[in-house]
Image: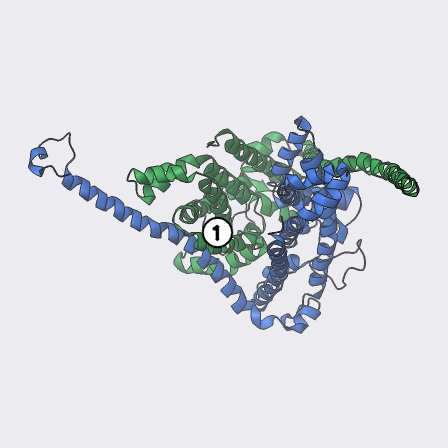
Chain colours: A blue, B green
Amino acid sequence: MALPNSEFKNDKNLIDRETVSKRIKMRLQMNEVFKYVFMAGLVFALVVLSTLIYDIVTKGAGWVDLDFLRNFPSRRAERAGLYPALIGTLWLMGLIIPIVFVLGVGAAIYLEEYAPKNRLTSFIEVNISNLAGVPSIVFGLLGLTLFVRAMALGNSVIAGALTLALMSLPIVIVAAQESLRSVKQELRHASLGLGASKWQTTFNVVLPSALPGIITGIILSVSRAIGETAPLIMVGAATFISTTPSGIFSDFTALPIQIYNWTGRPQAEFQNLAAAGIIVLMTVLIAMNSVAIYIRNKYSNRN
Amino acid sequence: MNEQKRELSIREMIQQNKQKKYSQTNVFDKVMPFLLFLSALVSVITTIGIAFTLGFELFKFFERVPVSEFLGKTEWYPMSADPRFGVWALVMGTLQITLIAMAVAIPFGLASAIYLSEYATERARRILKPILEVLAGVPTIVFGFFALSFVTPILKSLIPGLQIYNALSPGIVVGIMIIPMIASISEDAMSAVPRKIREGALGLGATRLEVAVKVVMPAALSGIIASIVLGMSRAIGETMIVTIAGGSQPNFEFNPLNAIQTMTAYIVQIAKGDAGYGTIEYYSIYAVGALLFVFTLLMNVFANWVTRRFREEY
């Protein structure tokens, strides 16, 4: 660097200080510019999210009140409510959670604690990860054929719940597996060393310690399922219904279906009703997610 | 003496308890693994169930409509007096949605991923990533409503020739829905690139931009490709946004300004209309569903393969 410039001026094979400093300046400028370009990508996503929320709140907030929650759907917008849809969604939730808990946790425990490392196990694992990518409407087709027609459950709550449960099962299994994997190996060894059997260790030591993570995973994936519309349309959830379910074999409707129904009507009031319905649906989902995050944070340092 | 006796009895007690307990735990230890195995099999049975139901009804469909028409023709008029079942009309609708969605999702998703992984401070990342995940948790019905009642009117004021139902608006919104997916999978892949490789490049005088584009992205390429392929498979299978905002006019022309119908939207239309069991329309949704299943399955398998095959090990 200390060499005099003149010596190298005409030698093209050597570095020209002027060119280099120009290039460095340009490279630094590009770096600075692209920092903001990348940031803009993220900001775009956040702006869209807030626009979406703003749009829905301005359209729907005025329509959400106690009557809206208590009334049945009506042809007259000002008297319409989503009571049966809300109850239907709660029914679905109450049915899906135990189903995915038993099947999802069972499968995860098998794969993490018991499964031998063989072809069948890796086939099951690959199968689960591929199932997670199957579109929800295909699960709807399965539900229509298997539960609604073959098992003759009709357009019932249980048919809808089973369909949504099968759909969320892969995600529950993966979340439960991760949670089980994070349980320290020492705990298992200590329990086995004290003379506990494999099942005693799994049930009394490993499972309790993995439970917060499992519950968080279940709530998150069930909140996903609750927001699904397409599979419920496939199993024939009614768009217009004047009763709430009286049992698991009753006809039902759910919040997304009700919202979809209102979205399809041309009048502006029904668009606002749809927005109001979305506010209710999103409130249910946010409540579920908050519980999940609370559980995760409360127990996250226990292991 | 007395003590000895008591000790013995305790020993016996333990022995007895052990036997009792063992017999009880023996049952659990034998039965539970089997029950757990059965619950793990449920997912396999689900896959078989999907393949079987789709295949079975597909077979019935092909008894009524020749395969050559389904896969070789471009007209889809299932309800007319002289019905046509050329699935390419629906595939074209899905293709338009997917292309538009990826044109939105890839640049914004990758930019978000690069920013989060290479530029953002740890604190900013901890705040921004969960917000991005909120976007991923928004139900598709909400995005559908947003597309129809917010994006379409704006686009209509910009593009006069735009129909109320079109491919552009739902395509853009599907893309927005996929941004978090591409961002989060790519960001995971890029964050997994070890720090020392970055520092090596920085030490040689590279700028952060050059490190991101020339060092980190190539190293994380398998994850990035996987995220894009998974995003595409999501776009192909997306149902509600395209049903609400895309219309129901299958046509084999590439014009995002016109109403379309995707494969998924067709399935919803027929299912909603309560097509009688046993009619051609009823079987046709399984044929379309089978094609959809094959498309998405191939893409998911490909994404998994890419991740495993080309993962850079450090």
Mark 1 surroundings within 10 Å by alpha-carbon count, few (fewer than 14), some (14 through 19), many (20 or more): many
Answer yes or no: is residue B157 visible.
Answer: yes
In percent of width and height, residue B238 lies at 56, 47
User: Is residue B200 shown left or right of residue B220?
Assistant: left
Nearest to the observer: residue B173 or residue B243: B173
Of the 4 image quadrants, the one containing the N terminus of chain A is top left
Q: Which residue is drawn at 80% across and 45% down?
A: A152
**Place of residue B93 in the rendered image (x, y in percent of width and height, measured from the top left):** 52, 44
**SS at badge 1:** helix
In this figure, which residue is indicated by the disc labeled 1?
Answer: B176
Image height check: is B314 above or below B89? Answer: above
User: Toward which corner of the image does residue B91 lie, by quadrant?
Assistant: top right
Tell me the subunit letter for badge 1.
B
Looking at this rendering, what residue extends furthest in the left direction? A6
**For this rendering, which residue is in front, B11 or B225?**
B11
**Amino acid type assigned to the residue bearing label 1 in the image:** Ile
Res B251 visible: no
Number of numbered discs on residues? 1
- Give whichever of B141, B126 is nearer the camera: B126
Between B226 and A18, the one nearer to me in the picture: A18
Q: Residue placed at 48% from the left, 32% from the top?
A: B311
User: Residue A45 placed where, x, y %?
Assistant: 45, 54
